[in-house]
């Protein structure tokens, strides 16, 4: 089973600075965390334009919730967590859950 952490970043004060820091500094920190299986990011687009959306969403997958906890207790995880304050001027919301896949019938 996969355990997923989702980080939703609010619109930053300076999007270009956010993008550069996320790409050049934060991503290498995050991908160095032990136990990380996958990191994927995307810029959400609303289906309903009147609804607010995050500026960026990051999904980090781990083998289990225990592995995720160990990753964030590691030196690499602490460095990645501490780095958020350096660039996420629009805030960051973190949620996590056990991933349950349901396959569509064809």
Image: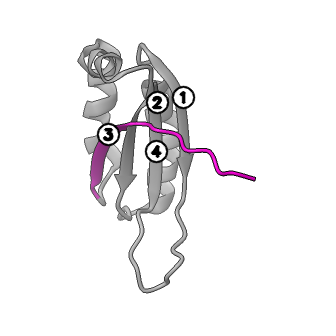
Residue density around tag 4, few if under 14, some if 14–19, many if 20 or more, within 10 Å: some
Residue 82's image quarter?
top left
Residue drawn at the location 32% of the way across and 22% of the way down: 77
The reply, left or right, for residue 16 in relation to residue 9 is right
Instruction: Find residue 62 and report its horizontal and vertical position in percent.
Output: 43, 24
Residue drawn at the location 49% of the way across and 33% of the way down: 27
Q: Nearer the viewer, residue 47 or 81?
A: 47
Structural distance between the alpha carbons of marks 2 and 3: 10 Å
Residue density around tag 1, few if under 14, some if 14–19, many if 20 or more, within 10 Å: few
Residue density around tag 3, few if under 14, some if 14–19, many if 20 or more, within 10 Å: some
Q: Nearer the viewer, residue 99 or 89?
A: 99
Indicate whether residue 6 is drawn in magenta: no
Residue density around tag 2, few if under 14, some if 14–19, many if 20 or more, within 10 Å: many
Q: Nearer the viewer, residue 104 or 52?
A: 104
What is the secondary structure assignment of the residue under circle 4? Answer: strand
Q: Are marks 1 and 2 in contact (CB under 8 Å)?
A: yes
| Outermost right residue | 106
What is the secondary structure assignment of the residue under circle 1? Answer: strand
User: Does label 3 or label 1 sit earlier along the sequence?
Assistant: 1
Which residue is denoted by mark 3 in the rendering? 96
User: Does label 1 or label 4 sit earlier along the sequence?
Assistant: 1
Q: Are marks 4 and 2 in contact (CB under 8 Å)?
A: no
Structural distance between the alpha carbons of marks 1 and 4: 10 Å
User: Which tag is nearer the camera, tag 4 or tag 2?
Assistant: 2
* Relative height, residue 62 to residue 48 (above, below): above
Residue 103's image quarter?
top right
Structural distance between the alpha carbons of marks 3 and 1: 14 Å
Instruction: Find residue 33 and report its horizontal and vertical position in percent.
Output: 41, 18
Which residue is denoted by mark 1 in the rendering? 38
Which residue is denoted by mark 2 in the rendering? 61
Which residue is denoted by mark 4 in the rendering? 58
**Magenta stretch in the rendered image:** 91-106
């Amino acid at each position: 089973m996969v355990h997923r952490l989702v980080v939703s970043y609010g619109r930053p004060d300076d999007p270009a600075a956010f993008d550069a820091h996320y790409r050049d500094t934060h991503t290498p920190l995050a991908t160095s965390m032990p136990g990380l299986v996958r990191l994927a990011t995307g810029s959400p687009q609303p289906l309903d334009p009147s609804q607010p959306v995050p500026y960026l969403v990051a999904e980090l997958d781990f083998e289990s919730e225990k592995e995720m906890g160990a990753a964030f207790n590691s030196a690499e995880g602490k460095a990645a967590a501490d780095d958020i304050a350096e660039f996420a001027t629009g805030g960051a919301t973190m949620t996590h859950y056990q991933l349950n896949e349901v396959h569509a019938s064809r």
